[in-house]
Image (spheres, rainbow, N blue to C red):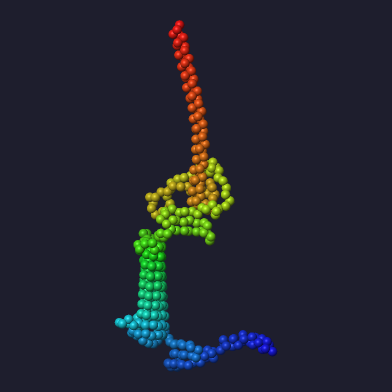
Amino acid sequence: MFHRIRRVGLTALPFLAAALAASPAGAQSDILLRLRSGSPAGDRFRVDSAGGVVAIGELGIGIIPATGSGYRMMWYPFKAAFRAGGTDDGGAGNYWDDANIGFYSWAGGNLTKAGAFGTFAFGDQTEVTGVDGAAFGGSNIVSGTAGFSTGASNRCTGFGCVAMGFTNTAGGQGAVAIGYRVTADADYAVALGHRASANGHDGAFVAADQSTTDSLEASANNQFNTRYAGGYRLYTNATTTTGVSLNAGGSSWNVISDRNRKENFLGVDGEDLLMRLRAVPVTTWQYRDEADRTVRHMGPMAQDWHAAFGFSRDATTINMSDLDGVNLAGVKALEQRTAALQQQLTARDAEIAQLRARQDASDRRIAELEAAVRAITHQK
């Protein structure tokens, strides 16, 4: 019997849930407090038995409920703005007066301002005056349209700027400053880490470490700058078995070349390699787009390299590890040639020495014979 009742109850649950969902709010909670105004009268404030609270207003109608310093939670219907916290600075306390309240704005905490359309400010002494801007934290200032800041003592003044961390500046359009005392003071500049600065250069990317208190500064527009005194590691697969590294204090790349990470070894025919190299022209040239037009370079063309060796599927690039390998194999092939030639020269030197010894012996024999002839002639 119990199981039958249980089954009936479970069957009825969906219908009960649907009925409750379709019921008006009043069926779920009673109105405990209702304040009405206007003609005809309409609800302005309600509190219900479920703990719900609603204050109803209309945009552009009404006056600010409170001004000056103090502590309050305030809904300002005229601007559809909300405030909660305190503005007691011991002085004017006008942070939440009408002049510092933007339409559709929200400010909370201590001495915060959200003074433009669609702004949000929360924390301690944080000010947002750029349209659609937002900030969290302490003493942050966002004056750029659609700017965002979080942390403390940051300045975000450009359109679409981002400043996060401590004492950072994002002063250009689309500028991003994240870290500690970094500066992105130009359009589309990015400064990350510790004491990194775009130094007024548009489009610059600067990232710096904590190895010094000196700032790393960009020196040109659209420049990429990094400082990491502990070195660099760039891996090209998930298992960190391929890639390159740059030692701390180093100035050239290390290529991962561990024998244990390689397979399918084949020998190299040095003579064949030298023959292929003969077909690869080496010239001096300039890059079409290099900024300094006085600079010349030397090397092969990728297309010629690819035709000779075919190491890569990309006929417009040369893998530097392959280039080093070909050069080293070429040196070994030439060394083998040199060794073979040296053996030949050594053998010929020995043969020449023998011939000279024979010649010397012949010369001595001839001299002896000539002396004997002279002696016989003299006796006659």
Q: Is residue 18 left or right of residue 353?
A: right
Q: Quadrant of residue 112?
A: bottom left
Number of numbered labels in the structure image:
0
Residue in view at x 44 percent, y 90 percent:
44
Image position, residue 329 (x, y; %): 51, 45
Image position, residue 203 (x, y; %): 40, 63
Q: Quadrant of the C terminus?
A: top left
Q: Is residue 47 left or right of residue 198?
A: right
Residue in view at x 49 percent, y 48 percent:
324
Q: Is residue 292 left or right of residue 347?
A: left
Is residue 103 visible to us here? no
Q: Nearer the viewer, residue 64 or 212?
A: 212
In this view, the residue farthest toward the top is 380
Image position, residue 286 (x, y; %): 42, 50
In this view, the residue farthest toward the right is 1
Against 165, is 2 above or below?
A: below
Residue in view at x 38 percent, y 85 percent:
72
Residue in view at x 37 percent, y 66 percent:
182
Image position, residue 4 (x, y; %): 68, 88
Against 164, is 1 above or below?
A: below
Q: Quadrant of the N terminus?
A: bottom right
Against 361, is 198 above or below?
A: below
Is residue 369 visible to us here? yes
